[in-house]
Amino acid sequence: MLKRVLLTCTLLLLPFAAQAEEAYVAGKDYDVISPAIRTADPEKIEAVEFFWYGCGHCYNFEPVLAQWKKTLDEDVSFRGIPAMWGGAMEQHAKAYYAARALGVAEKMDQVIFQALNVDRKQLRSDKEIAELFVQNGVAEEDFFKAYNSFGVSSQVRQADATARAAKITGTPAMMVNGKYLIGPRKAGSTANMLKIADFLIEKERAAANEG
């Protein structure tokens, strides 16, 4: 009798389990990247945001993303990758990596977002970008040393190659473990992008535990 009850309960739960597994579907809610892209740290599940400082949607997404990052477990790493489609985007990408080389990333991310989206500055020249850093406590000489460094140039090239391999078509977009790409069009909203990212992170965690 007990076996029959347990079997009945299991059968009743199966549709719910299947529904949970199919909460988000490849091709419908997110895309599978093929071939998969190598992550920065293979020991962790990697979450990536592709963004552009001049993208209004990225600017609005930033505070929500910042809160989400605080919820990530220790087995998950996060990094931003600036998108580049021409114009001043490569210079903005250089500014992104220069800020990290100078140890002022958290401050300058907000400053550059503000300059492009609120203050309506163009930041189309190295001089304009340098002035922004100088206004926020960075010596001009230090800025240009980082901005024009081999390390920053290498990171910019790698960022562009990664974005191309992921075949991103807009920003913001997210990538999980080099295998899955999430965009707002298929996700429906930036809030749903984070829900799908959580789902895919858990999917990768489960796969790692099975292995």
Image (tube, rainbow, N blue to C red):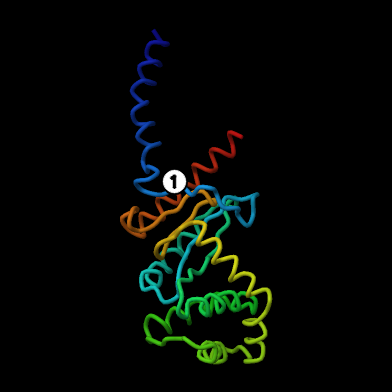
Is 164 situated above or below 178?
below
- Viewer-proximal residue among 126 and 76: 126
Q: Residue furthest top?
A: 1
- Viewer-proximal residue among 135 and 129: 129
Picture mark count: 1
From the top left corner, tell me how far across and down residue 33 is, in percent: 48, 49
- In the image, what residue occupies the spot 47% across and 64% down? 50
Q: Residue furthest left?
A: 188
- Viewer-proximal residue among 70 and 33: 33
From the top left corner, tell me how far across and down residue 84 is, in percent: 48, 71
- Quadrant location of residue 14? top left
From the top left corner, tell me how far across and down residue 198 is, in percent: 45, 49
Under tag 1, what secondary structure? helix
- In the image, what residue occupies the spot 40% across and 49% down? 30
- In the image, what residue occupies the spot 63% across and 87% down? 144
- In the image, what residue occupies the spot 47% across and 46% down? 200
State the residue position of label 1: 199
Is 200 situated above or below 15?
below
- Quadrant location of residue 113? bottom left
Which three-letter amino acid code belongs to the residue tagged 1? Phe
Looking at the rendered image, the quarter that the N terminus falls into is top left
Question: 79 left or right of 120?
Answer: right
From the top left corner, tell me how far across and down residue 167 is, in percent: 46, 58
Question: How dense is the environment of label 1, judged by Cα within 10 Å: few (below 14), some, or many (20 and up)?
Answer: some
Looking at the rendered image, the quarter that the C terminus falls into is top right
